[in-house]
Image (cartoon, helix red, strand yellow):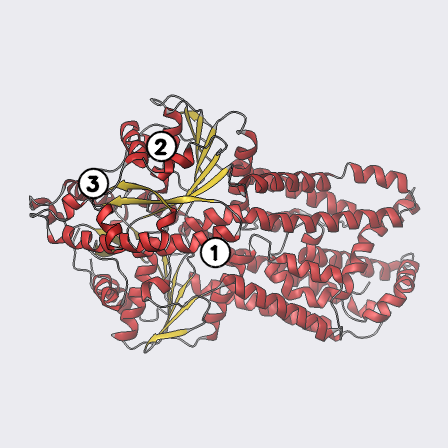
Amino acid sequence: MPLIGSEKKEKKGEGGIKGVLYGMAVHGSVTAFLKTRMYMEHLFMLMTLGDMLGFPIIPPYYSLKLLPYVVPNIKAWKMRMFRERDFTDLITS
Amino acid sequence: MTGLLEYFEKNPETSVVIFAGKGGLGKTTCSAALSYYMATVQQRRVLCFSTDPQASLSDIFERDLFGKGEIEIVPNLFVVEIDADKRIKEYQEEVKRKILDMYKLDKLPEEVEEYIESASAEPAMYESATYDAMAELVARGEYDLYVFDMPPFGHGVRMVAMAEILAKWVDKITEAREEARKYEAVAATLRGKRVEEDELLKELLEIKKKMSFFTELLTDSRKTAFFMVLVPEKMAILDTERALEMFEALGIRMSGVVVNQVYPRELLDDPKTPEFLRNKVVSQQKYLEEIKEKFGKYIVAVIPAFDREPKGFEMLKLVSEHLMKSRIEL
Amino acid sequence: MNRLRDILSKKTLRYMFTGGKGGVGKTVVAAGLAYYFASSGEKTLLASLNPVHSLSSLFAQDLTGGVIKRVEGVENLYAIEVEIDDIVERYKENIARRLKEFLKWADIPLDPKPFIEIATTNPAFQESAMFDKMMDIVLQEAQNFDRIVFDTAAVANAVRLIGLSKIYGLWLARMIKSRKEALSLRVQLSFRKEKVMEEIKKDPLMADLISMNEKFSKVRKILTNSEETAFFFVTLPLSLPIAVVKRFINMVRAYDIPVGGVVVNQIIERKLGEAEDATAYIKNKYREQLHYMEIIERDLGSLVVAYLPMYPREVVGVEMVAKLAEDLLEYKPDFLEELRVEA
């Protein structure tokens, strides 16, 4: 679940990476690491660009300063935000 | 009453002076007068920075300074009247350019473009930009003395509080980023290295450094002086009391109170003094008593009400004489 | 008879604001306008939007508490010193609720408290809160009152408060757009579209944003309509307050807010300034004033709608407000005619 960079690879291979991640999710400790990292990334995105979704957390002046670094992730982040829940819904119900 | 000169003698390390208080009481005049004195009499390199949209250094110095950067108005005296809106625009352009460069794009993704454009609409943007400009100037350290007038009361106190809040924000973000990096080793096995991530962290620490530098300066009473400006009127006294409480809560020591626009008591002895002025003097005397009682130990200077507006070098010189070596006893 | 009477006689004019540099007398002018309407038999609300209120001390009675109170001694006149503590509290609860919901929704199993704290210390709260209250008064009290006069905070804030409605709209529009986008994305990606659609319909954030945006656009429409709204600037015959008024008239116009006119306050009469036994102080003041009166006539002449004299004492109490209201509509400086000839 990259936060930064490798944008082209990310765009093309996003499903792939996701697949790998979710595939790994059934395996022990790596899963915990990845999960925590994912949460942290969620939170980071939420803090920096939260007002995109209606949660103005960090002053936008500083959001703008950080924006260039998260550009490749905005779309993926938004998608993830809403896809994952459904995914969880599906496997838990 | 000794005036600000004695304060500077006792606190020789003072490099930042902030005048706070309600709008229209003479903060900007005091800033300009102090700056003028320090530059012309003490030959110190002074930067006078206005953040008050109500008062204007352009009017006081009788020269258009708005959005023109640091202007040396007399030798050693530099004046800045920030155009926050312009600064925000430039900043937006800078961010856009950075994104285009970073990702070798010809055009910004629509949602990114939209996001940047509408960010200027966020209510706190103006304030953030002003604050950032202040912090940047002080961090550059090119002047011996920085003199700021604060925007009207609420804004002023909020600005100081903001330094703390922003530092907290950045702490959280940095923490989240560092936490995320710990797991990076695992994640990296899936993809390759990512240089930008380090740059992002660097940027975060940079923001934090800039802010904490300024916060530390603001709460360092050896280096920073906070003066409240008030006039002998009920509202101003109430305001000053409130501000004192807030400053205390923020851990900022009040350096002193400047009482402005004081009519000489002697006017009462002159039978020719018209009624409105007579009543004004009488009402001022009442409030001056209250000021003495409430802020007695803080009062550092008393500035009389002049028969002309305090603008232009000649008047600033006159104001600065009262401000620096206060001669009026309450 | 002055121009102000013409303007105020327009029945469609429902909302008035006063602004100017600190200490020029915005509050007394607002009170004077409100008194005039009330004494002409119109039910009037005088609302103070200042961070530090002074209506209570002006009318010498308790008008505190953030609720509409009847002004004793003036029929038809009501006043409110707007408090924002409750709205700031509500904002905080609101954003805390949203954040909690969001973290739960996004399945982030972290303690939301520190983030709520950070989000709710956003310094823009206070400003937005005062603006919000002003909008509520405009929208909710219009049916209860014939006229509403706002004593607005320091000029920059005053203009910004109204100007912000334009900016806020833009900001909200973006928030709504991205929220919609996010929600529709959810529908597209969902395995159970109906369930998601249901959720979207009752999405509290979306509902909030939409109602807020509706409120903004309604108020914006009212405040930019010169039939309904007028913004009055108060100045003294001194260069700094004049400069501020000029600057803010430009700002207000840029925001499409209608300018009602300029009121020149605290004028020293010629009979005082040129009296043979006048003190040097008064003579100098008067001379300076004449100079600035000329500048006002030259630069703002067409906008000046009223003058107020320097009163022998501070304006306090209903009686003095009544006198001031009368002067607001009748008073003319005794040197005005000559001034115009000279200018």
Where residue C142 appears, as percent x and y from the top left, is 53, 29
Gap in Å between the C-alphas at discs 3 and 2? 18 Å
Secondary structure type for disc 1 = helix
Q: Mark 2 — on which chain does it sit?
A: C
Instruction: Relative to C45, say whether C221 is above or below.
Output: below
- Which amino acid type corresponds to the residue marked 2 in the rendered image? Ser
Pick whichever, C180 or C104, lies toward us. C180
If you read the primary sequence from the N terminus, does the residue marked by circle 1 or circle 3 appear first? 1
Mark 1 residue crowding within 10 angstroms, few (<14) / some (14–19) / many (20+): some
Secondary structure type for disc 2 = helix
| 1 or 3: mark nearer the eye | 3
User: Which residue lies under the disc numbered 3?
Assistant: B283
Left or right: where A23 falls relative to C205: right
User: Which residue lies under the disc numbered 2?
Assistant: C56
Left or right: where B201 falls relative to C275: right
Q: Mark 3 — on which chain does it sit?
A: B
Gap in Å between the C-alphas at discs 1 and 2? 29 Å
Instruction: Relative to C86, say whether A40 is above or below.
Output: below
Where residue C205 appears, as percent x and y from the top left, is 71, 42
Q: Residue at x 17, y 41 (%)?
A: B282
In which quadrant of the rendered view does residue B201 lie?
bottom right
- Same chain for labels 1 and 2? Say yes or no: no
Residue C163 appearing in the image: yes
